């Protein structure tokens, strides 16, 4: 019982640390999800993803710094193999992961110019897609009302139901197209619920559209 209680306390503290780390992101973006883009933190992808580096106009000197930092973090992650499966070792692993994530956030904050940080924040919101409107910080910045929030939840609920039906037959290329189309339709529905000022603010928060498909790893031979 004591071990379980200690695990719950530690997990709670770690989750609080993760939440605090996310709040430091430029523009207040949250973890990726619901936006259908790229999969993975943009701060992590920026270290190695060329299209993302080009979009942020990353210099050659910055690329060298990114490479050195990536190698440093990769070396630190080799130590994950030492952790076993019991509670204390899993907690220790989580602590290392949080530490590495904090280092990554701090590194990006110190390595990017103000303009680059602003653009990265815009791309983070684009990657979030519809999930952005349910993000507390984004919703507050947009001035989403309680009534709008309830309507957004309803759109998400309906979308998830339709997506489950689409997935029932397998997730093939055709299903992927339908999902992308459905997400786009639902995104438009939500934006139509917003006021002109909110839509203008959202445009400022996301900036020029970026093709999130460029964030996906390239397959060998392509």
Image (cartoon, helix red, strand yellow):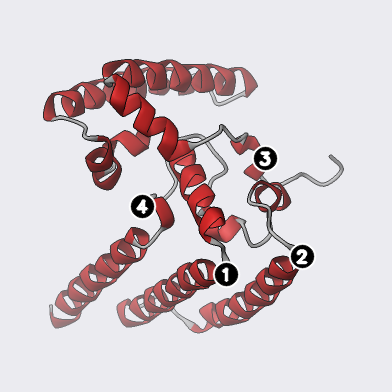
Q: Is residue 34 above or below residue 157?
A: below
* Earlier-in-chain disc, 3 versus 1: 1
Q: Tally the numbered discs.
A: 4
The spot of residue 210 in percent (x, y) is: 60, 35
Which residue is identified by label 3?
Answer: 214
Residue found 49% across the figure and 67% down from its top: 109
Q: Are marks 4 and 3 in contact (CB under 8 Å)?
A: no
Which mark is in front, 2 or 3? Answer: 2
CA gap, disc 2 and disc 3: 20 Å
Q: Quadrant of residue 11?
A: bottom left
Q: Secondary structure at mark 2?
A: helix
Q: CA distance from mark 4 to mark 3?
A: 22 Å
Q: Are marks 1 and 2 in contact (CB under 8 Å)?
A: no
Q: Pointer 4: what residue? A: 28
Circle nearer the N terminus (2, 4): 4
Q: Which secondary structure lies at badge 3?
A: helix
Q: Residues within 10 Å of mark 2 (few under 14, many from 20)?
A: few
Q: Position of residue 119 (x, y in %)?
A: 53, 48
- Residue on which the image places disc 2: 60
Q: Residues within 10 Å of mark 3 (few under 14, many from 20)?
A: some
Report the disc number at residue 111.
Answer: 1
Quadrant location, the N terminus: bottom left
Closer to the chain start, of discs 1 and 4, is 4
């Amino acid at each position: 019982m004591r071990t379980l209680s200690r695990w719950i306390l530690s997990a709670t503290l770690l989750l609080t640390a993760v939440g605090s780390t996310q709040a430091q992101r430029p523009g207040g973006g949250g973890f990726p999800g619901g936006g259908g883009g790229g999969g993975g933190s943009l701060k992590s992808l920026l270290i190695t993803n060329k299209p993302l580096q080009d979009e942020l106009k990353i210099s050659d000197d910055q690329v060298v710094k990114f490479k050195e930092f990536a190698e440093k973090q990769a070396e630190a992650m080799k130590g994950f193999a030492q952790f076993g499966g019991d509670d204390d070792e899993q907690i220790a692993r989580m602590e290392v992961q949080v530490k590495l994530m904090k280092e990554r956030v701090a590194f990006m904050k110190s390595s990017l110019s103000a303009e680059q940080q602003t653009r990265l924040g815009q791309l983070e919101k684009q990657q979030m897609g519809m999930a952005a409107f349910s993000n507390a910080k984004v919703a507050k910045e947009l001035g989403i009302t309680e009534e709008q929030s309830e309507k957004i939840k309803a759109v998400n609920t309906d979308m998830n139901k339709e997506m489950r039906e689409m997935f029932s037959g397998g997730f093939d290329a055709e299903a992927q197209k339908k999902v992308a189309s459905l997400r786009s339709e639902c995104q438009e529905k939500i934006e139509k619920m917003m006021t002109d000022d909110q839509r203008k603010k959202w445009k400022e928060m996301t900036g020029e559209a970026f093709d999130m498909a460029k964030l996906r790893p390239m397959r060998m031979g392509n």
